[in-house]
Amino acid sequence: MSQTDQNVANAAGATVRSDINDHLEAIQTQNSSAVAPTTTFQFQRWMDSGALIHKARNAADGAWINVLKFTASTVTPYMNGILLAIPSQAEAEAGSATSERIWTAQRVKQAILALGTAGAVATVGQAEAEAGSATTRRIWTAQRVKQAILALTTFSPDFSATGETVTNDTLLEVAHGLGAIPSLVKVSLVNVTGELGYSTGDEITGSEFSYGLRDRGISILIDATNISIIQGLGIAVLDKSTFNDASVAVAKWTWTVRVWT
């Protein structure tokens, strides 16, 4: 290993010969030394024996550029000053590093497999299919499509209230909380104690509950806040057995209100 000033000075023959041999040794060993050459030139080569890095002088002869990294058995190149190492499996699978790397077939496969797992499209669940609001890509089975369609066509109210008290000559206000005037409202009279041929749970709807009787029946007022049931002097229905109109005993009935936006 040797470094010289790359200049053969005039001298006696043996001295010149020794100087030439020193220059040849410096060339052959790439100016190998743990210390950089004192005399430098454009594109000069230097093997830094301390760091085991082969370096080249830049075009301006102003700095050394790393070219190759040596170990006892390997040589790894640099690119733009960065050692081109093989990425680890973790780095390959993460896929986020921007440093230059030397890729093996194994690492490429690992990266592709990781990408496929991360981007895997799952089968939609029943709850998600029925809700119909998620925007994530999913694989749909015939079963899930059917469940989504059935959920879409089920006429479920957006608001409902049950067990509302029936009281003559009273305004009953039921707050629906929709913040807008509903597009559809259904008010039903529900039996809680058998009367006039009706049984507990029977529900009567589609009626003004008056049947021509004076001051009987209800009016329904709808706004963006409430469903208001204006109850008259009495609530009349047709007797299920006799088919004649009759006033109900209000304690035996309640109101159920259903609202759709």
Image (cartoon, rainbow, N blue to C red):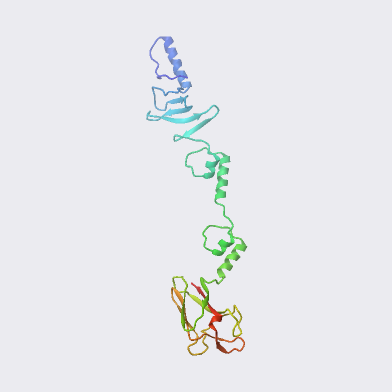
Q: Nearer the viewer, residue 226 or 31?
A: 226
Q: Nearer the viewer, residue 193 or 90?
A: 193
Q: Left or right: where does residue 26 sit relative to residue 92?
A: left
Q: Is residue 79 above or below residue 47?
A: below
Q: Residue furthest front?
A: 251
> Residue sitting at 46 percent across and 82 percent down?
170
How far across and down, in percent of the image, does residue 163 sit? 53, 75
Q: Is residue 217 above or below residue 91?
A: below
How far across and down, in percent of the image, does residue 104 sit? 56, 38
How far across and down, in percent of the image, does residue 94 sit? 52, 44
Quadrant in the picture for residue 195 = bottom right
- Regarding residue 206, the answer to whether it shows in the image is no
> Residue sitting at 42 percent across and 10 percent down?
13
Tally the numbered discs. 0
Q: Is residue 52 above or below residue 93?
A: above
- Regarding residue 55, the answer to whether it shows in the image is yes
How far across and down, in percent of the image, does residue 1 sit? 47, 19
